Every structure is written in structure tokens, then in C-alpha cells.
Image: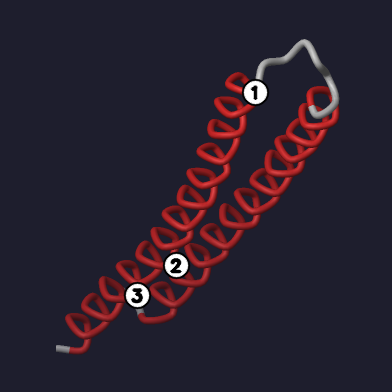
Amino acid sequence: MDSKIIDSNRKIFSQFIDFQKNMFENSYAMINNIQEQGEQLFNKSIEKNPLVPNDTIKVCTYWMDFIKKNRKNYKSYVDTNFVKVKDIFQINESEDSSNIKK
């Protein structure tokens, strides 16, 4: 293959990955905001409600914290894998271009 084609493919792939990453970031931010608003609404609705037992509040708080923690872990995992995909592609493209020069 011609090196111009390889560079063009690399640029297209990089743009594709950047687009997918931006889509993920926007979707994640939207879901994060919705879940935070839900948490705030839940807290306001039960904080002064005498009908809700303390054990129920503790369990719900535990689950909200659990979801928050795993949401952050998921984002970290996806971000790491976006970097890995770009790195793998760069390595493969470098190997392909070195084979062409031979």
C-alpha cells in the first residue's frame, strides 16, 4: 500500500475513534446528570418523611453510592480502552508502513 493511503486510513480511524469517544462522553454526562437529579429528588423526598424507616434509608443510600462508584469505574474502564484501541491501531499502522518500505 501507498504511505498516503495508510496515513489517510490512520486519520480516518483516529477521527472515528474521537467521534465515538465524544459520543460516549456526551451520553455519560447526560446519564450522570439524570442519575444525580434522581438522587437529589430521592433525598429530598425521604429526608423528612417520618414514614420511611432508617434501615430503608441506609439501604437506599448504600445502593446510590454503589451505583455512583460503579458509574465512575465504568467511565474509567471505557476511557482506558479508547486509549488502548488508538495505541493498537498506531502500532499496527507502524508495522504496516515498515513492511512497505522493505
Of the numbered discs 2 and 3, the one sitting upstream in the chain is 2
Closer-to-camera residue (79/60): 60
Measure the alpha-carbon separation of dots 1 and 2: 59 Å
Q: Which residue is mark 1?
A: 54
Q: Residues within 10 Å of mark 2 (few under 14, many from 20)?
A: few
Judged left or right of residue 99, residue 23 is right
Closer-to-camera residue (73/84): 73
As drawn, 67 above or below 10 = above
As drawn, 86 above or below 71 = below
Closer-to-camera residue (78/20): 78
Q: Are marks 1 and 3 in contact (CB under 8 Å)?
A: no
Q: Which quarter of the rendered picture does the N terminus lie within?
A: bottom left
Q: Position of residue 78 (x, y in %)?
A: 45, 53
Q: Which quarter of the rendered picture does the C terminus lie within?
A: bottom left
Q: Position of residue 70 (x, y in %)?
A: 48, 43
Amino acid identity at mark 3: Gln
Q: Which residue is mark 3?
A: 90
